[in-house]
Amino acid sequence: MPLQKPWRDLDRDAIAAAPDRPGVYELGDESGTVVAVDHGVLRDELKSALAYGDGDRVRWSETHTLDQARDLAAEHRERLG
């Protein structure tokens, strides 16, 4: 089950809109297929993803702690299997 958020282009505008808080994020290709699921401080993670060209699109969900983000990302990866 994908995150229930709309895709955004992975660009500087998306990074500027990303909160400086922990969360889970999906990276997608141009067609919207999920290519990666990860967690961390969202703005920092997305800066790295953009710099390395890890995806074309992104969507995310905030969490309260990094531990929650890690657990949610693990569950999410299992569902995408």
Image (cartoon, rainbow, N blue to C red):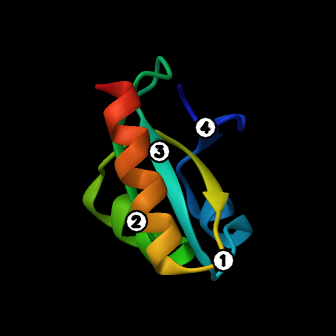
The label nearer to you, 2 versus 3, is 2
Name which of mark 3 and mark 1 comes first in the sequence. Answer: 3
User: Does the CB distance between marks 3 and 4 fall below 8 Å?
Assistant: yes
Labelled disc at residue 26: 3
Labelled disc at residue 64: 1
Q: Residue at x 55, y 30 (%)?
A: 2
Q: Which residue is mark 2?
A: 70
Name which of mark 1 and mark 2 comes first in the sequence. Answer: 1
Nearer-the-camera pick, 13 or 21: 21
The label nearer to you, 4 versus 1, is 1
Q: Report how far apart the C-alphas of labels 4 and 1 lie in the structure.
A: 17 Å
Q: Report how far apart the C-alphas of labels 2 and 3 lie in the structure.
A: 13 Å
Neighbours of disc 2 within 10 Å: few (<14), some (14-19), many (20+): some
Q: Secondary structure at mark 2?
A: helix
Nearer-the-camera pick, 74 or 21: 74
Q: Residue at x 59, y 64 (%)?
A: 12
- Image x and y of residue 27, in percent: 43, 43
